[in-house]
Amino acid sequence: MRGAALYCVAVRTPQGEILVDTQSLGASSLRTRLGRWPLLRGLIVLWDALVIGTRALTYSANAQAESANERIEGAPLAVTLVGSVVAGLALFLLLPAAVGHLIQTALGWPHWAANLTEGIFRLVLLVGYIAAIGRLPEIRRVFGYHGAEHQTISAFEAGETLTPASIAPYPLEHPRCGTAFLLTVAVLSILLFGALGPMPLLPRLGYRLLLVPVLAGLSYEYLRLTGKYRDSWLSRALSWPNLALQRLTTRPPSPEMVEVALAAFQTLRRAEQDQPSGPYGA
């Protein structure tokens, strides 16, 4: 669970105990200045998502370790993080760009048609990947915790008394979700990359990498705008695809999963009593 200045990670050990780790999001004059600028603040959110996500998964994995030798830390952790980022960029950014270039050169399609095909292929690849891994038992369990996070925040925002029973009726989808960010990046890449002209393969791949920060910034501002006016019919219509995709990344949680989500959220609220408040996110 993420707040304005802190985040909390809760995990259940094999012995049934719930452990909670509270960490600062970090503060610096540079971070504060960047956080005020449109587009640039999206980069902070993207970086935080990578760092916090890695730390959370590492903390969870280490809590399940039966011995110190099974813990993930140091060089293995760094290699895992770098390898994951490289693999993600290669699969979801560079591979579709290479496919678009192949279509343009081999079939003689105009660059706009090849760029459009590239974007659609990227979108299908992302949705297909999420749907495929969601069939794995371990990932289904992760998605159950994801649903518990969303239900807890929705119940809090509705003024509900937070108990596993009172949280259960709330929706699994939430507008402030990282899944929404991924889908927005994929859709906006169609528009942004589609505006580029024809180019050889290596410059094509290079421009895709260079424009990742621009995509992140635009996606964040789009989500921020639709969230601000989420009660309007237009905002609800624009947000519908993001909420629909979350049906793939969430599962109905068990009461035990909701207890873990509650532990993280309640610890965060107590820790931020003397800090700037919300909005909370998962």
Image (cartoon, rainbow, N blue to C red):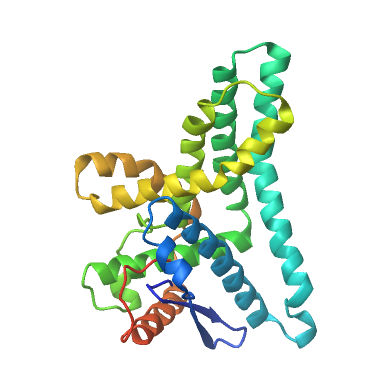
* Count of number-bearing discs: 0
Rendering coords of residue 193 (x, y %): 54, 31
Along the horizontal axis of the image, is 243 left or right of 71? left
Instruction: Answer whether residue 247 is visible to the viewer in this image.
Output: no
Rendering coords of residue 148 (x, y %): 42, 68
Along the horizontal axis of the image, is 168 left or right of 258? left
| Image vertical order of residue 219 relative to residue 26, above or below | above
Q: Nearer the viewer, residue 125 or 44?
A: 44
Along the horizontal axis of the image, is 39 left or right of 206? left
| Image vertical order of residue 129 relative to residue 138, above or below | above
Q: Nearer the viewer, residue 115 or 208?
A: 208
Q: Residue at x 43, y 45 (%)?
A: 218
Q: Residue at x 25, y 50 (%)?
A: 230
Q: Residue at x 69, y 63 (%)?
A: 81
**For residue 175, what is the image quadrant?**
bottom left
Rendering coords of residue 219 (x, y %): 43, 46
| Image vertical order of residue 36 relative to residue 277, above or below | above
On the rendered image, what quadrant is the C terminus found in? bottom left
Rendering coords of residue 57 (x, y %): 61, 70
Q: Nearer the viewer, residue 61 or 104?
A: 104
| Image vertical order of residue 119 relative to residue 224, above or below | above
Q: Residue at x 59, y 84 (%)?
A: 13
On the rendered image, what quadrant is the N terminus found in? bottom left
Along the horizontal axis of the image, is 16 left or right of 203? left
Instruction: Answer whether residue 71 is visible to the viewer in this image.
Output: yes
Q: Nearer the viewer, residue 28 or 277?
A: 28
